[in-house]
Image (cartoon, grey):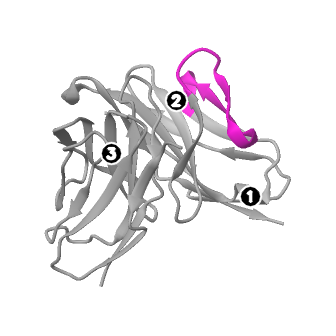
C-alpha cells in the first residue's frame, strides 16, 4: 500500500524568504503526486500535480514541486512567500485500488502547517 | 458554477445520537469520498464510492455509514457507535479515472456535547 510522509509538522518562515516543504512517498509503481493547501476551517485546494514527464511541475500561486524518483520525494517550493501563504499543506500520492476494479484513491500525508512572520 | 456543497458547516450532537452530514456535487463526478481530519493526523479515509449504489470502506469506517442512491449525493451518517466523533469532516469528488485529482467541499465541523 502507498504511504506519504511529511516530516515537518510546523514550519515558520519570514515573509519574502524562500520555502521548501518536504514530502516522501512509498509506492511500488510509478506514483502520481499532488500538493494541496488548506486555509483554516476550509476544504483543500489543489496546488499542483505530477503524473509523468518533466520532473519539475509548476502550480498555482507561484508554487513548484520537483519529483525525484531516486529519493522518493516530491518537495514543494516557493522562491518568496507572502503572508497569504500561511496555511496547512498536504502532499498526496495516488494509486489504483486493486480491491475496487482499479479505481483510484489518494493517500494523504499528515500535513505541514506554515506560519509566516513579518 | 460547479462544485461540492457540504452542510451544515457546524453541527452539534449529543452523545448517543446519530447525525447525518450532507455532501452534494454538481460536477458530474462518478467518485465521491469522505475524510475525517484531526489535528496532527492529516486526512483519513472513511468511505468512498466510485459508482451509484456501491461504496467501499476506507481506513476508519467503524461507527460510520454511507449511501449512494444518486450520483450527486453521498451523505455520511455518524452513528452512536463512533467513539470519538468530534472532528472536521471533508467530502471530495473526482472523475474516478486514472490520475484524477479531487475537488473538496468546505467541510463540516462536528462537535459532540
As drawn, the label of residue B33 is 3
The residue labelled by disc 2 is A72
Q: Is residue A13 visible?
A: no
Can residue B67 be found in the magenta stretch? no
Query: Magenta stretch?
Result: A50-73
Is residue A112 rendered to the left or right of residue A97?
right
Q: Vertically, is B103 above or below B19?
A: above
Secondary structure of the residue carrying tag 3 is strand
Per the image, the residue denoted by label 1 is A84
Q: Chain of mark 1?
A: A
Rendered residue at 53%/35% (across/down): A34
* Residue A3 spot, x, y in % from top left: 39, 39
Foreground disc of the pair 2, 1? 1
Against B25, residue A84 (above or below) is below
Apparent side of residue A32 relative to residue A89 in the rendered image (left or right): left
Mark 3 and mark 2 in contact? Answer it, CB < 8 Å: no
Whether discs 2 and 1 lie on one chain: the answer is: yes
Residue at mark 2: chain: A
Amino acid at each position: 500500500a502507498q504511504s506519504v510522509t511529511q516530516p515537518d509538522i510546523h514550519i515558520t518562515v519570514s515573509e519574502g524568504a524562500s520555502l521548501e516543504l518536504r514530502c516522501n512517498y512509498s509506492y511500488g509503481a510509478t506514483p502520481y503526486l499532488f500538493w494541496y493547501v488548506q486555509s483554516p476551517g476550509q476544504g483543500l485546494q489543489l496546488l499542483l500535480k505530477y503524473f509523468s514527464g518533466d520532473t519539475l511541475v509548476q502550480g498555482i500561486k507561484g508554487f513548484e514541486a520537483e519529483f525525484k524518483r531516486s529519493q522518493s520525494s516530491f518537495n514543494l517550493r516557493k522562491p518568496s512567500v507572502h503572508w497569504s501563504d500561511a496555511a496547512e499543506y498536504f502532499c498526496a500520492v495516488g494509486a489504483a485500488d486493486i480491491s475496487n476494479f482499479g479505481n483510484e484513491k489518494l493517500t494523504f500525508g499528515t500535513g505541514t502547517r506554515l506560519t509566516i512572520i513579518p | 458554477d460547479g462544485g461540492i456543497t457540504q452542510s451544515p458547516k457546524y453541527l452539534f450532537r449529543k452523545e448517543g445520537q446519530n447525525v447525518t452530514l450532507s455532501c452534494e456535487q454538481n460536477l458530474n463526478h462518478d467518485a465521491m469520498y469522505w475524510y475525517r481530519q484531526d489535528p496532527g493526523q492529516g486526512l483519513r479515509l472513511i468511505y468512498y464510492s466510485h459508482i451509484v449504489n456501491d461504496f467501499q470502506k476506507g481506513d476508519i469506517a467503524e461507527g460510520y455509514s454511507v449511501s449512494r442512491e444518486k450520483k450527486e449525493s453521498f451523505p455520511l451518517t455518524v452513528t452512536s457507535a463512533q467513539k470519538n466523533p468530534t472532528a472536521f469532516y471533508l467530502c471530495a469528488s473526482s472523475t474516478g479515472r486514472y490520475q484524477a485529482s479531487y475537488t473538496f467541499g468546505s467541510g463540516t465541523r462536528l462537535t459532540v456535547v
